[in-house]
Image: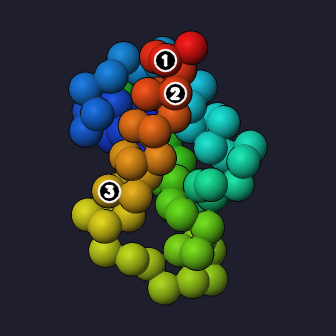
Amino acid sequence: MTALEVVDASGHDRWGIQPRISELVSARAVVDSGRTRANPSGRQAIVWVLPEYGPGRDAMPFGVAAEHVMQSLAAKMEGRNNE
């Protein structure tokens, strides 16, 4: 999923999601798939995937990958809300 796709799917603010994606990248919980998609402004955005589905691996169905990413983000957001 791209960052804006995560925003759309989660209902959270972009400014709250983008730092979480950066944290997931730093933790190697998601990786750059090597693919991009156009966002609403027409700019190309990185498609983030789980490491086991990164470049050189078979892609997992989008819905399942999206569910995994959303669960990771939800857990991260929940942890921040409890601080």
In the visual, does 47 lie left or right of 41?
A: right
- At horizontal 48% and vertical 53% (from top left) the residue drawn is 47
The residue beneath circle 2 is 79
- At horizontal 49% and vertical 17% (from top left) the residue drawn is 82
| Residue 48 disc label | none
Count neighbours of disc 2 (C-alpha within 10 A) and say few if under 14, some if 14 to 19, many if 20 or more: few
Q: Quadrant of the C terminus?
A: top right
Specify the quadrant of the image occupied by residue 38. top left
Instruction: Return the residue nearer the eye: 47 or 60.
Output: 60
- The reply to whether callout 2 and callout 3 are in contact (CB within 8 Å) is no
The residue beneath circle 3 is 67
Q: Is residue 74 above or below residue 82?
A: below
Q: Secondary structure at mark 1?
A: loop
Type of amino acid under label 3: Glu
Using the rendered image of the protein, determine whether residue 31 is visible from the camera's viewpoint: yes
Number of callouts? 3
- The CA distance from mark 3 to mark 1 is 22 Å
Specify the quadrant of the image occupied by residue 2. top left
- At horizontal 67% and vertical 46% (from top left) the residue drawn is 25
- The reply to whether callout 1 and callout 2 are in contact (CB within 8 Å) is yes
- The CA distance from mark 2 to mark 3 is 18 Å
Type of amino acid under label 1: Asn
In the visual, does 3 lie left or right of 40?
A: right
The residue beneath circle 1 is 82
Q: Secondary structure at mark 3?
A: helix
From the top left corner, tell me how far across and down residue 32 is, in percent. Answer: 61, 57
From the top left corner, tell me how far across and down residue 60 is, in percent. Answer: 39, 77
